[in-house]
Image: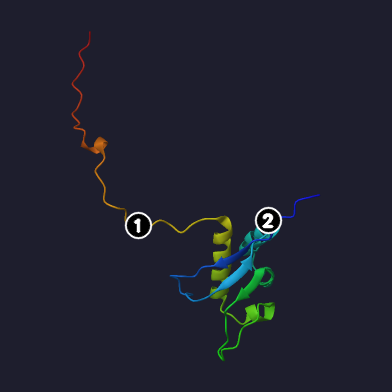
Amino acid sequence: MGYRPKRRIFRLDFEGTDYEGLEVSMRGLTVGEELELNDLRRREGAVVRWFEILTGLLVEWNVEDEQGQPVPTTFDGVRTQDSALVTAILDALQTAASGVSDPLPQASPAGEPSEVASIPMAPLSESRAS
């Protein structure tokens, strides 16, 4: 009797981006798919395979065409979309799968100054030869 790992499904978050309102569910990348995608990003002419992998990961999305009809999660459906949107989806998947959280806010709460910074410093006196 062996262990069968469950495939993770990620619900990607686009809040605060140019794609706010976009809802996408994708299955996680296998190690092989991740390695292949990283290799494909460096090779010219490998764009079709890159989009094929992405299409295979799509579970569902709420993308509609200009007439308000749902765009299928097929290779032909993905081909009708802006490449920046598709790249943003894959980037969001890789971020979600890696477990990397969003960066911390730039502002930090006000706090007390460090004691080390408040210790008075004076130059050492010259030592005398004995």
Question: Disc 2 designates what residue?
Answer: 31
Q: Toward which corner of the image does residue 64 lie, by quadrant?
A: bottom right
Q: Horizontal and vertical percent for residue 95?
A: 54, 60
Residue extending farthest to the front is: 1
Tell me the quarter of the picture where residue 113 sits: top left
Q: Residue furthest right?
A: 1
> Mark 2 or mark 1, which has the lower sequence index?
2
Name the residue: 62% across, 62% down: 42
Tag of residue 106: 1
* Front in this rendered view, residue 22 or 86: 22
> Which kind of residue does numbered mark 2 sit on?
Val
**Which residue: 19% across, 19% down?**
126
Coordinates of residue 59 in the picture (x, y in percent): 65, 72
Looking at the image, how many numbered discs can be counted on the residues? 2
Depth check, front residue: 15 or 88: 15
- Residue at figure coordinates x 21%, y 33% from the top left: 119
